[in-house]
Amino acid sequence: MTPLKKPVKIAMVDDHVLLRDALATVIDRFDNCKVILLAAHGKELLEKIQPDDLPDLVILDLNMPEMDGYETARHLRMNYPGIYVLVLTMYDSEITLLRLLQAGARGFLKKDIHPGELNMAIQSVMASGYFYSYNSAGKLVNLFKKDKSNNNQADRLSLSENELTFLKLASTDMTYKEIAIMMKISPRTIDNYRDALFIKLNVKSRVGLAIYAIKSGVVTLEY
């Protein structure tokens, strides 16, 4: 791939300071890249963005306090559509990739990415608008394959915001009644969300919902 002639202005957003600073140092060594902004989460990014000096590309961690990768990508898509977004994530399940696509992400990077692939990802997004690794590309192909019922995986995993909220709360120790009160909906509606997610996610219990949520990055464990 031919290197980009114009220097790419990049914002790095990650609450893990060592990783963020290390990646910024690596990126600054690329011939055509310059990190102009560092932030710990989406809220800080939006506070620091200067309208007269916007980054060309935001490299965004998925799981952050204050404002996570999903929220930040959606906000950038709606308010700064000219900024491309690459997401750093340890999660590459189908539901994660689908949610990131819906949020406006242009590509996905694993946190153990090689510097050469990172450089290639930046150039690919700036030149063509997208970057997908071999692994994520394969998952996306499977995501949109038609099954025997003429539906596809993307349709099956398209969860509504209420379903996602329920999935997060169902992964806590709250009772279904407490979840209904918090979501301001009836217990019967909660039962409908639960039963629909059992089918969509192919699980059979609340424990199964919680395990799926953790594996997919919908909820994260704090250490």
Image (cartoon, rainbow, N blue to C red):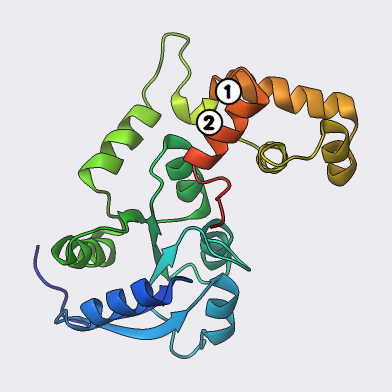
Residue 157 — which label? Answer: 2
* x, y percent for residue 124: 22, 61
Instruction: Name the residue carrying label 1.
Output: 200
Residue 140 horizontal side relative to residue 197, left or right: left
Asked if residue 218 is positioned above or below residue 32 in the image, the reply reads: above
Q: Residue at x 44, y 63 (%)?
A: 61
* x, y percent for residue 214: 53, 41
Mark 2 crowdedness (10 Å alpha carbons): few <14, some 14-19, many ≥20: some
Name the foreground residue: 48 vs 81.
48
Q: Residue at x 83, y 27 (%)?
A: 189
Q: Which type of secondary structure does the marked residue at label 1 adopt?
A: helix
- Image quadrant where one finds the N terminus: bottom left
| Residue lying at the far front of the rendered structure | 223
Q: Are marks 2 and 1 in contact (CB under 8 Å)?
A: yes
* x, y percent for residue 178: 87, 39
Residues under labels 2 and 1: Cα distance? 6 Å
Asked whether residue 30 appears in the rendered view, the answer is yes
Q: Amino acid at mark 1?
A: Lys
